[in-house]
Image: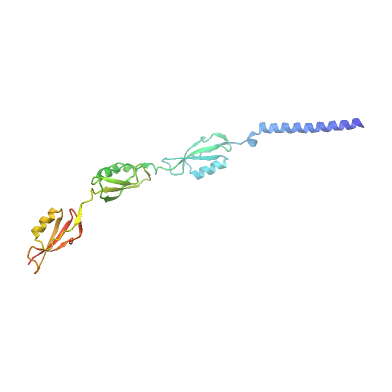
Amino acid sequence: MPNVKIGSIILRVLSVIAVLLIMVVVGTAIYIFLPTSAVGKTVIVPDVTGKHLINATNILCKSKLRVNKIYEEHSLEKNYIISQDPLPGTKVKSGRTIDLKVSVGNSMVIRVPNLQNIPLTEAKHHLNRLSNQKLQTGQISYAYSSVEKDYVIAQSPLPKTKLPENSKINLLISLGNRPFSFYMPELTGMKLDDATKLVKKIGLRITRIREEISTEYERGTIINQKPLYGYRVTIGDGLTLTVANK
């Protein structure tokens, strides 16, 4: 009886050892002969160049590949794929990251030139030379400034700004130094000759002379003026005088 028990125990031990050996052999075979299913499946990188970013991302995700986006300026439309790395047809493991160069379009490649402190005519000419880049002269405004007359004081947008095609450049042009201003003197009651000398002396201009019948003033006497006495005027302003004529 003791011999029977010992033989039974040995048989059980050998059975366990055999099962363990079979498990090891099977596991090794799976690792060696089936790596694509257990370790990481090999896939072929699809071609997504020229495709929209959304479509390209979907295609790569279906192939179990990841996406890294790199944006740059290009003639392709915005959000279209310029190139990819690895190249199409390359064999890689699933989960590999594919670098995609994505276009931001060519509508942001125009840099605004510096037009400040040059004459308006030169600024317009410079923009005309850039017509192939579709920059245009926009609104032109004027202001008094210490900058030389008819020169560009400022511009909007600023130099080196990147703009879309067909953008307009607004310019602020100098009128030169602000003219000296003063109060309009009283001319009513003066003779036209005397008033003419005074107006010329203070830098104003007589642009119109009207005649009006008057019994109160002598002929040739100023009976009305525009601008009126006391109004603020600047050098070069024009006047309208009304002269008595009996």
Q: Which quadrant: the C terminus?
A: bottom left
Count of marks, rendered view: 0
Q: Position of residue 54 (x, y in %)?
A: 50, 45
Q: Nearer the viewer, residue 203 or 33?
A: 203
Residue at x 82% of width, y 32% of height: 13
Res 215 → quadrant? bottom left
Q: Position of residue 186 (x, y in %)?
A: 15, 61
Res 38 → quadrant? top right
Q: Nearer the viewer, residue 206 or 34?
A: 206
Q: Is residue 21 above or below residue 213?
A: above
Q: Position of residue 70 (x, y in %)?
A: 48, 39
Q: Nearer the viewer, residue 23 or 49?
A: 23
Residue at x 83% of width, y 33% of height: 12
Relative side of 127 to 77, left or right: left
Residue lying farthest bottom? 215
Q: Which quadrant: the N terminus?
A: top right
Q: Position of residue 176 (x, y in %)?
A: 23, 48
Relative side of 28 to 69, left or right: right
Residue at x 11% of width, y 57% of height: 196
Q: Is residue 128 above or below residue 23?
A: below
